[in-house]
Image (tube, grey):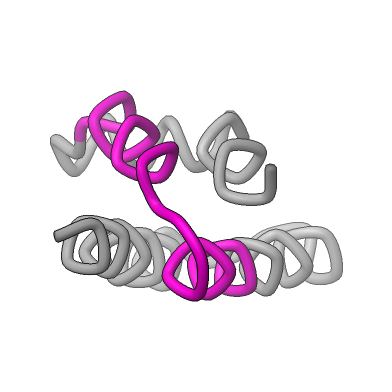
């Protein structure tokens, strides 16, 4: 699962921890998604993962913003 894989990346965990983001809660919300919301979250996670793989390094500010946006979408779409 793309979102779970992204959330498991060490650099994502480091940034989330520094920002006080609970990745376990985000991962649980992802597991509850179905249909289009789940597919959308997966596409976003795949894109961020792809960027991390291509760039090798992404600025922490950019990563924090992308991570927060992804998590907010996961939480919002879950409702």
Residue 53 place in picture, x, y as percent: 82, 59
Residue 5 place in picture, x, y as percent: 66, 38
Of all residues, the one furthest to the top in this rendering is 24
Quarter of the C terminus within the rendering: bottom left
Label tally: 0
- Asked whether 2 falls inside the magenta stretch, the response is no
* Above or below: residue 77 compared with residue 22: below
Residue at 70% x, 59% y is: 49
* Above or below: residue 20 compared with residue 2: above
- Asked whether 32 falls inside the magenta stretch, the response is yes
Does residue 79 appear left or right of residue 42 in this picture? left
Residue at 49% x, 65% y is: 41
Is 28 or 68 nearer to us in this picture? 28
Is 71 or 62 nearer to us in this picture? 71
Region of the chain picked out in magenta, as a range: 22-44
Residue 19 place in picture, x, y as percent: 18, 43
Of all residues, the one furthest to the front in this rendering is 35
Quarter of image, res 51? bottom right
Quarter of image, res 72? bottom left
Residue 29 place in picture, x, y as percent: 29, 41
Residue at 49% x, 42% y is: 12
Of all residues, the one furthest to the right in this rendering is 54
Quarter of the N terminus within the rendering: top right
Residue at 31% x, 24% y is: 24
Chief secondary structure of the magenta portion: helix
């Amino acid at each position: 699962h793309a979102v779970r894989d992204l959330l498991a990346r060490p650099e994502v965990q480091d940034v989330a921890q520094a920002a006080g983001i609970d990745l376990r809660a985000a991962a649980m919300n992802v597991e509850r998604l179905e249909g289009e919301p789940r597919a959308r979250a997966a596409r976003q996670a795949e894109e961020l993962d792809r960027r991390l793989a291509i760039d090798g390094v992404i600025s922490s500010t950019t990563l924090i913003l992308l991570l927060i946006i992804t998590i907010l979408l996961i939480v919002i779409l879950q409702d």
